[in-house]
């Protein structure tokens, strides 16, 4: 891989832990060695336990220099990245549910949470969100778009995009904003030719990616209406026969980058 665009180190570390039935000796040794090197007093305190959970913190028994903490985290992330890429090169990677998506173009679905998140920073250029009213969309017309960026940060962890291959087949791919490298954003993904590695976590209908559907997730009447519209109720037994053919796989992306 020539350039890393996105890496979800927490998910990668979980997979590596499962593979090794626990934290690998190599990663453990790296964490201890680097944490000791960057500790202010050169000793390993109880704060090192935070590193085994892949987090950087400071406490009275294990202080870390704030200026060096980012360097330390980068070193630990790169260790996990190297181990994960090594796993991808092996045939056994499929045993852990990992699959490769190549030659697929990514697009942000219109009216989705990912779409709103991608335009939210630009909305602040406008003096009033009234300029976005009268959209003929009752959901958007009742949203304070100036606050939506902050709300989404607290309300949603992963954002869905569509991956469409050369045959026209679609999959839903999900990204955690914290995994982006070099300050890339969601809308940058549409311009890139990426190779993606991820794990299937479920299925959904493309229609359900709309922000309106996300807002109605707790509305039982809405759920019933959706089941009637699509002829499928996920809570009914023996629903395989009624499962819609256009239901898409959902892939949580662990690694994305440029390979050619």
Image: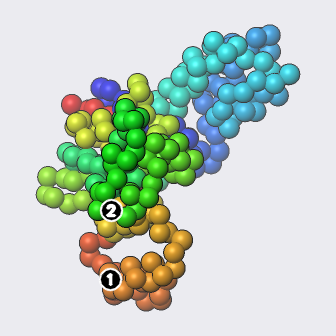
Which residue is identified by label 2?
Answer: 137
Which one is in front in this view, the residue at disc 1 or the one at disc 2? 2
Q: Residues within 10 Å of mark 2 (few under 14, many from 20)?
A: few
Outermost right residue: 60
Give me the residue at 66% from left, 32% from top.
55
Residue 134 in the image: state x and y as whole percent: 31, 57
Q: Which mark is residue 23?
A: none
SS label for mark 2: loop
**Quadrant housing the N terminus:** top left
Q: Is residue 62 above or below residue 145?
A: above
Mark 1 to mark 2: distance in Å? 20 Å
Residue 180 in the image: state x and y as whole percent: 43, 34
Residue 63 in the image: state x and y as whole percent: 78, 18
Residue 219 in the image: state x and y as whole percent: 51, 75
Q: Is residue 15 above or below residue 201?
A: above
Whether residue 91 sits left or right of residue 33 in the image: it is left
Residue 12 visible in the displayed image: no
Between 96 and 43, the residue placed more toward the observer is 43
Between 191 and 135, the residue placed more toward the observer is 135
Between 231 and 116, the residue placed more toward the observer is 116
Give me the residue at 49% from left, 69% from top.
217
Give me the residue at 53% from left, 22% from top.
74
Which residue is identified by label 1?
Answer: 229
**Quadrant housing the C terminus:** top left
Give me the residue at 20% from left, 60% from top.
169
Residue 177 visible in the displayed image: yes
């Amino acid at each position: 891989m020539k350039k890393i665009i996105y890496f979800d180190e927490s998910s990668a570390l979980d997979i590596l832990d499962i593979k090794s039935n626990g934290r690998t000796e190599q990663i453990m040794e790296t964490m201890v060695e680097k944490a000791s090197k960057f500790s202010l007093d050169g000793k390993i305190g109880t704060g090192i336990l935070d590193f085994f959970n892949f987090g950087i913190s400071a406490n009275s028994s294990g202080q870390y220099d704030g200026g060096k903490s980012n360097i330390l985290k980068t070193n630990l992330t790169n260790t996990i990245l190297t181990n994960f890429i090594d796993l991808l090169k092996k045939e056994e990677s499929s045993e852990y549910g990992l699959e490769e998506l190549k030659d697929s173009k990514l697009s942000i679905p219109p009216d989705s949470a990912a779409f709103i998140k991608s335009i939210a920073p630009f909305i602040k250029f406008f003096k009033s969100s009234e300029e976005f009213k009268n959209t003929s969309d009752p959901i958007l017309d009742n949203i304070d778009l100036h606050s939506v960026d902050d709300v989404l940060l607290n309300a949603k962890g992963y954002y869905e995009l569509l991956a469409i291959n050369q045959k026209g087949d679609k999959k839903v791919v999900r990204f955690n904003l914290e995994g982006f490298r070099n300050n890339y954003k969601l809308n940058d993904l549409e311009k890139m030719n990426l190779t993606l590695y991820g794990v299937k976590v479920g299925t959904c209908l493309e229609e359900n990616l709309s922000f309106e559907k996300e807002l109605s997730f707790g509305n039982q009447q809405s759920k019933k209406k959706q089941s009637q519209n699509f002829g499928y109720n996920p809570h009914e037994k023996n629903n395989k026969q009624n499962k819609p053919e256009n239901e898409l796989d959902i892939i949580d992306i662990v690694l994305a980058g440029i390979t050619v």
